[in-house]
Every structure is written in C-alpha cells, then in structure tokens.
Amino acid sequence: MASLKERQHTISLPKTRSRTKDQFLKNDKALIEWGMQIIKTIQFALIAASLFTAPTLVQAASGDSEYEEVSYEDLLNELSAKKQKVTQSSTSSFDDVRLHAGIGYANSFTNISANNQNFNRHTNGIQLSLGMDLFSPNWYSEGVFKNYGVSSSGSEEFTLRELDLKIGYTNRLESIWSYSISSGLSNRFLRFSDSSKGISVNETTPSLIVSTGFMAQVHKHLSLGAEVSAHTAMVNRTSDKNSFDFAFRLNTSL
C-alpha cells in the first residue's frame, strides 16, 4: 500500500507542475494581449494626432510654396529701384545746393543832402556777386559788392562803394525766362566833397534794399539779365538818404 501511495504521489507531482505551467501560459497570454491593446491605443492616438495636424502642415507648406514668377527684366528693375532708394537715403541735403557767382555793370542814382541842399548824382561801376541755394532751387541767399570808383567834375568829387546781403526768391516764367525778388541789408560807403561850396561828406550808411529782375537762361550754367534796386536809409542823420540802382548781370551756377 505504501508503495502504491508513493506511486500516486509521484504521479501527482507532474500534474501540479503542468497546471502551474498552464497558469503561466495564461498569464503570459493575458500580458501579451494587454500589451497589444496598449500598442493599438498608441497607434490610434498617433493616427488621430496626424489627422488633426495634417491640415496645418499642408496650409503652412502651401503658404511657403506660394511664389510669383518674375522675369529677368522685372528683377533688374526691382533691384534698380531698391538701389535708388538706398542712394537717395544716403545722400545729404547739401548735395542739391548750388553755388552762384556773377559779375555786372551797375549804375547808381543817389540823392545826397548836405548843407541844406539836395544833390542828385549818377555814377557807374562794377559789381561782383556770390550766392547759394537755400535747400531749394527757388530760394537763395546772395552777397553783392559794388564799386563805383571815383567821379569828379570841377571841384566836386564823388566816391561810392556798397555791400549788400540779400535773401531772394526766383521762379521760371516761360521758356528761358525767369524772375527774381530779393530783399536785405545794404551798407553804403559814400564820400562827397566840393571845395567851392564848402561841402565835405564822408559817411557809412546802413540801408534797406529791395531788388527785382529778369534773367534768361542761355546755358545750363549761364544766365543773363537785368536788375533794379531801391535803397532807403535806416538812420535819419545821414546825407545818403535814398538811391536807385540799375545793373546788367551775368550769372553762373555750379
């Protein structure tokens, strides 16, 4: 009997082991199925995410791929326009400023008051001018020096020099013609003497000056014209009360 029981016990051991093995197989199978479900869930999530992000990516790609065809000439014109903009922005406002220089033949008619008498005298001379644009082709500043030399008649002697500083405006009329209007300050150095009448005047008189004239542009840098000016003294105690000038001018611009 004992041997029979021992045999039965020895036979039952393999059954227990086989059951344990089956349980492990079942557990492994469950783990594998659980893992497969997780993998499928992750795959589904990735597919859903790709479906949601695909329109955005397509839109971005289409936005990046949009372009406009241009010809070679259009490209050159665009580059040239950009170059001109850069050049204009890098240029200074002084680049458009022109200098003016001129020479002229001037005549002056002066009213002199001395020893309770009035004398009207005429003299002529040469004038030199130098000016520049005031950041505009229409506005300018100018300095003019006039030297009328010495005029003598009998015992009378008359000497006159003048320095003018003016600001003016000029504009084109039509064709080659243009006009100018200017105003400023003038300083006149006058000497007038007559020994027979006991007159001796040697004065410097500040005056206001107003001028206007016409010019003809005969060349790109050359113009011819005429100008008239009127002076009035800024002080009362002077012999040089009023005067009137007329000049022919030759101007150049640089």
Image (cartoon, helix red, strand yellow):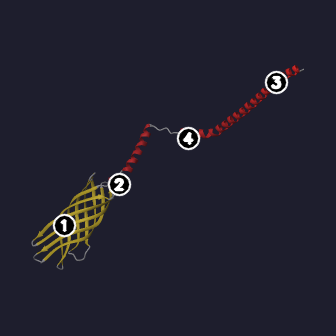
Please report whichever mark, 3 or 2, sits nearer to the chain's N-terminal start: 3
Q: Residues under labels 1 and 4: Cα distance?
A: 78 Å
Badge nearest the viewer, 3 or 2: 3
Q: Decide which of tag 3 and tag 4 comes sooner along the chain.
A: 3
Q: Which residue is mark 2?
A: 93
Q: Which residue: 12% across, 71% down? A: 157
Outermost residue toward the front in this view: 2
* Mark 1 to mark 2 CA distance (whole Å): 36 Å
* Residue designated by label 1: 161
Q: Counting other residues with Cα less than 10 Å from the Cα at mark 2, is it few (<14), some (14-19), or many (20 or more)?
A: few
Q: Which numbered tag is attached to residue 63? A: 4
59 on left or right of 78:
right
Badge nearest the viewer, 1 or 2: 2
- In the rendered view, tell whether residue 92 sits above or below residue 212: above
Question: Which marked residue is nearer to the observer: mark 1 or mark 3?
Answer: 3
Image spot of residue 219 (x, y percent): 26, 51
Most distant residue in the right direction: 1
Question: Which amino acid, by three-letter code, is at mark 4?
Answer: Gly
Which residue type carries mark 1? Answer: Arg
Label 3 sits on residue: 13
The image shows a total of numbered marks equal to 4
- How far, Cα to Cα, is label 3 from label 4? 74 Å
